[in-house]
Amino acid sequence: MQVLHIQTPLLESTPLSQIVGSEVWLKMEALQPSGSFKLRGIGRACSYHAGRGVQRFISSSGGNAGIAVAYCGRKLGLPVTVVVPLSTPERAIETIKCEQAEVIVSGESWQEAHGHAQSLSGRDRVLIHPFDDPLLWEGHATLIDEVKQSGLRPDAVVLSVGGGGLLCGVLEGLHRNDMADVPVLAVETEGAASLGASLKAGHHLELERITTVATSLGAKKVADKAWEWCGRHEILSLSVSDLEAVDSCLQFAADHRHLVEPACGAALAAVYGQQPFLNDKKTILLVVCGGVGVSFEQLQQWQQDLEKR
Ligand SMILES: *Cc1c(COP(=O)(O)O)cnc(C)c1O
């Protein structure tokens, strides 16, 4: 089976290590060719389906999942259709088209676009889900395989949670690499804290609405599997404000010269904000999940707008 993701660098961050007073290691998923970790899982799913002879990939994401599916289709020589809602920024549509995928703009919300995408799927046209698919988690788990191969054994993993695909993959990776006891700090923005709300309520619930600049975290309900993991692994849930996420992206750009989305900034904010949970952890693995929906000007604009609130 063709592997479509790359092995990413694992970098020790001097600025972040100084802030928390321990070793902070960055897994640089922002450097995947599609700009985010999503390529690991989506590459795994697309490769698998290509192997069983599907003729087309379909996606309902105008974000990093859609871009990853488009990239995989181009690499595997299969056509891709991405259905995105009307609200999708022109830049995102251009990025997807740049990967030679067909873009259909349809529906007021993601749900409507997803419904349209579902109606296009069939026996030889497979809809690739952005977060809820065991093939995806298997692919995301390679991130931890690489950490293990490097010889690093973290005392905690810090990552962002949207629909929980990354979380499921990292947990699968920890368990298959003899690190089942390593706790995970799962970070969301306040306006997209579907995991946090479920944990607080004690049952798996769906948010009524999403209000955050971290659009890549905008799942109203996390995958069943993500919720299930909370019962069998030490997972601490944390919410940060949009402003904290955006500030952290700008600080990270200054410290490490890489641009990442606020979705990724949420995880960064846990470390920049010196979360007490990290106090006694000597070695911290921070998943820099990336994201292409960002520019320096956009980050500054968000920061200005959020500071006014
Ligand atoms: C998709 C995405 C997330 C959230 O991942 P889930 O698997 O949905 O939890 C976080 N950051 C970025 C940049 C993403 O693209």
Image (cartoon, rainbow, N blue to C red):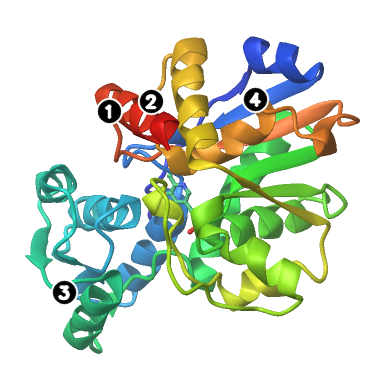
Residue 240, quarter of the rendered image: top right
Check disc 4 and report its element: helix, strand or loop.
helix
Check disc 3 and report its element: helix, strand or loop.
loop
Residue 162 percent coordinates (x, y): 51, 58
Residue 141 percent coordinates (x, y): 60, 53
Check disc 2 and report its element: helix, strand or loop.
loop
Q: Residues within 10 Å of mark 3 (few under 14, many from 20)?
A: some
Indicate if the residue with disc 3 has its beta carbon within 8 Å of ligand 1.
no
- Per the image, the residue denoted by label 3 is 107
User: Measuring 42% from the left and 47% from the top, which residue is drawn there?
Assistant: 214
Contact, mark 1 vs mark 2 (Cβ under 8 Å): yes
First of labels 2, 3 by sequence position? 3
Residue closest to the eye, 297 or 124: 297
First of labels 4, 3 by sequence position? 3
Residue 107 percent coordinates (x, y): 16, 74
Q: CA distance from mark 4 to mark 2?
A: 16 Å
Judge whether 73 appears above or below 28 on screen: below
- Per the image, the residue denoted by label 4 is 272
Contact, mark 4 vs mark 1 (Cβ under 8 Å): no
- Per the image, the residue denoted by label 1 is 295
Disc marking residue 259: 2
Q: Amino acid at mark 4?
A: Tyr
Q: CA distance from mark 4 to mark 3?
A: 38 Å
Q: Amino acid at mark 3?
A: Gly
Residue 208 shown left or right of residue 222 in the figure? left
Residue closest to the eye, 43 or 217: 217
Q: Would residue 216 be seen by someone viewing this image from the given angle? A: yes
User: Measuring 33% from the left and 50% from the top, which residue is drawn there?
Assistant: 64
Q: CA distance from mark 2 to mark 3?
A: 30 Å
First of labels 4, 1 by sequence position? 4
Residue closest to the eye, 305 or 185: 305
Q: Foreground mark, 2 or 3?
A: 3
